[in-house]
Image (cartoon, rainbow, N blue to C red):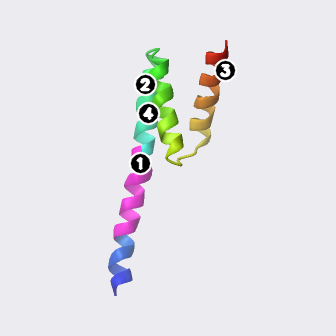
Amino acid sequence: MIMKKLLPILLIFFYFLGNAQGTKIAIADKKYKKYSYIDAIEIYEKVASKGYKSPELLKSLEMHIILMEN
């Protein structure tokens, strides 16, 4: 009985948790487009340090590392 009530709550929680990380990446992308590279990198790094991984995130971090080396 408890599992039937708990499962939908957990699903909703994890949905919003994943969606929040996507929102932070969108904010970082906007900062990047406005040439706020340092702010964008900080957001990307925070999101990655919390365990969120996606190809777009890793590509963005890689691009920033390349830019910082040049």
Compared across the picture, whether 67 is left or right of 11 comes to: right
Label number found at residue 30: 2
Q: Which residues are magenta?
A: 9-20
Residue at image coords 49%, 19%? 37
Residue type at numbered disc 3: Ile
> Which class describes the residues within 10 Å of circle 2: few (<14), some (14-19), or many (20+)?
some
How many callouts does the rendering have? 4
Q: Position of residue 38 (x, y in %)?
A: 48, 20
Gap between marks 2 and 4 measured at Cα:
6 Å
Q: Position of residue 47 (x, y in %)?
A: 48, 40
Residue toward you, 52 or 5: 52
> Which class describes the residues within 10 Å of circle 3: few (<14), some (14-19), or many (20+)?
few
First along the sequence among labels 1 and 4: 1
Residue type at numbered disc 1: Asn
The residue singled out by tag 1 in the image is 19
Q: Position of residue 68 (x, y in %)?
A: 61, 17
Label number found at residue 66: 3
Residue at image coords 41%, 57%? 15
Residue at image coords 44%, 33%? 26
